[in-house]
Image (spheres, grey):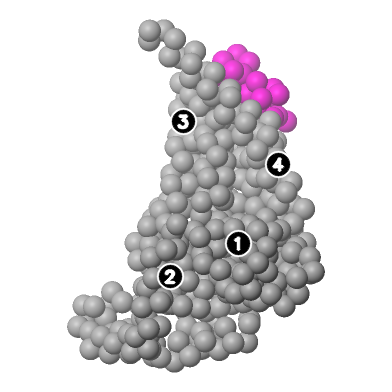
């Protein structure tokens, strides 16, 4: 029985390898086509196309088998192209993780990281003459980058007191580190199986990415922020509750003062600015980011994120998308003949798919079905999404008490 295990692992690795190449390149090209509308799509495209490219190159020249056999080490040009792309993808992965955590990156991050990758390969080729040594050093550099990214992500997670959804960033960084560890071990011990498994892990990362795209779109669209709940204009907590939290913060102990990033913040004033943000419909801007929202409110990025999560029980992405869906509802009600794609774009969604995803998530209906329901009933329809039932009841109770 144990004899067949390596063979099964080989088959699974081949399957994930091929699937990963196709998915990587498709997602990369899709993001590249959207780069004109949103610059961050160019960074996503750079990562996926680079990952798909080095996997495709490995498949074409049989990289795993040739590195596993020290007598058939690949040519220098193949090594330079393969590891140059690999180092670039590791550097860009760090850029995307930091961006998802809410930390801004340099607008020319792609060019900078490409230059770093090129400089590293030129330096290694100048200093080393043996191809196997170049491979070992490249693997160690990739491992160093991914390990640094993992440690940095974990530190940010605990330091900023982020919610559990941010652990997705840690998981992605961990998988990248495991991939580089296995790759280095495969080269050191001339083991083609370890190398094949290592080359298949990027495919697993892509599948993981797709899972997050479907279930947690905020993870890849902008930031890892908060929980998924419902309610468009009805947030948890009235002005009296906000005042209670504000008083609680002001009378905190010194220990709590160190832990709570909102200590000393006027929550009433923050609430007023958020309401002004809604009234002025700033959320309709397509390029709006958490950094822009925090600047509008007048607090730091992490303070406004923490405020939305703790006191409104909503993530930034959900907050913006629900406001946009509410606006789309009003536009549909006012003009039944207007194209739904145009309505979605006017409401701040960057594509038809993102509009559809948000509409299904917050109403339980596709835009087309929502339009039919609106004109069938002539009044706001009930949110049919299962995960929004409790909050709808809470909103009714709050309105009755008022």
Mark 1 crowdedness (10 Å alpha carbons): few <14, some 14-19, many ≥20: many
The quadrant of the image that shows the C terminus is: bottom left
Q: Is residue 360 left or right of residue 308?
A: right
Q: CA distance from mark 3 to mark 1?
A: 42 Å
- Disc 1: which residue: 359
Boundaries of the magenta span: 57-80
Residue under the image location 78 percent in, 65 percent down: 339
- Disc 3: which residue: 182
Residue 127 higher or lower than 18, as above or below: below
Q: Secondary structure at mark 2?
A: helix
Residue under the image location 68 percent in, 69 percent down: 375
Q: CA distance from mark 4 to mark 2?
A: 39 Å
Mark 2 crowdedness (10 Å alpha carbons): few <14, some 14-19, many ≥20: some
> Which of these two is toward me, 308 or 154?
308
Q: CA distance from mark 4 to mark 3?
A: 26 Å
Q: Are marks 4 and 1 in contact (CB under 8 Å)?
A: no
> Which of these two is toward me, 191 or 198?
198
Q: Is residue 68 magenta?
A: yes
- Disc 4: which residue: 26
Disc with the residue nearer the chain's start (1 vs 2)? 1
Q: CA distance from mark 2 to mark 3?
A: 49 Å
Q: CA distance from mark 4 to mark 1?
A: 25 Å
- Disc 2: which residue: 392
């Amino acid at each position: 029985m144990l004899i067949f295990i390596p063979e099964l692992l080989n088959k699974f690795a081949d399957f994930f390898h091929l699937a990963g190449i196709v998915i990587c390149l498709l997602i990369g090209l899709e993001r590249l086509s959207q780069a004109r509308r949103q610059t961050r799509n160019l960074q996503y495209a750079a990562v996926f196309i680079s990952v798909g490219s080095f996997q495709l190159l490995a498949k074409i020249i049989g990289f795993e088998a040739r590195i596993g056999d020290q007598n058939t080490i690949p040519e220098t040009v193949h090594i330079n192209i393969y590891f140059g792309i690999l180092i670039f993808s590791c550097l860009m992965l760090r850029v995307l993780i930091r961006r998802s955590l809410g930390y801004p990156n340099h607008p020319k991050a792609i060019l900078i990281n490409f230059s770093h990758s090129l400089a590293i390969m030129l330096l290694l080729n100048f200093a080393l003459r043996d191809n196997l040594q170049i491979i070992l050093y490249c693997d160690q550099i990739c491992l160093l980058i991914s390990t640094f990214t993992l440690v940095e992500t974990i530190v940010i997670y605990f330091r900023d007191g982020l919610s559990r959804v941010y652990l997705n960033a840690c998981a992605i960084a961990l998988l990248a580190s495991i991939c580089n560890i296995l790759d280095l071990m495969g080269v050191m011990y001339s083991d083609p199986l370890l190398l094949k498994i290592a080359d298949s892990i990027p495919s697993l990362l892509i599948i993981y990415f797709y899972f997050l795209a479907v279930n947690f779109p905020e993870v890849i669209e902008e930031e890892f922020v908060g929980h998924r709940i419902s309610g468009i204009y009805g947030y948890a907590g009235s002005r009296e509750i906000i005042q209670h939290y504000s008083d609680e913060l002001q009378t905190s102990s010194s220990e709590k003062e160190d832990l709570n990033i909102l200590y000393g913040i006027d929550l009433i004033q923050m609430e007023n600015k958020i309401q002004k943000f809604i009234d002025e419909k700033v959320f309709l801007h397509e390029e709006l980011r958490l950094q822009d929202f925090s600047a509008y409110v007048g607090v730091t990025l992490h303070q406004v994120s923490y405020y939305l999560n703790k006191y409104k029980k909503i993530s930034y992405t959900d907050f913006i998308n629900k406001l946009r869906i509410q606006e789309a509802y009003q536009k549909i009600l006012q003009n039944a003949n207007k194209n739904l794609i145009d309505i979605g774009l006017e409401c701040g969604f960057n594509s038809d798919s993102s509009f559809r995803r948000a509409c299904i998530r917050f109403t339980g209906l596709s835009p087309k079905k929502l339009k039919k329901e609106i004109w069938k009933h002539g009044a706001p329809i009930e949110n049919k999404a299962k995960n929004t039932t409790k909050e709808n009841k809470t909103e009714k109770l709050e309105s009755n008490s008022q």
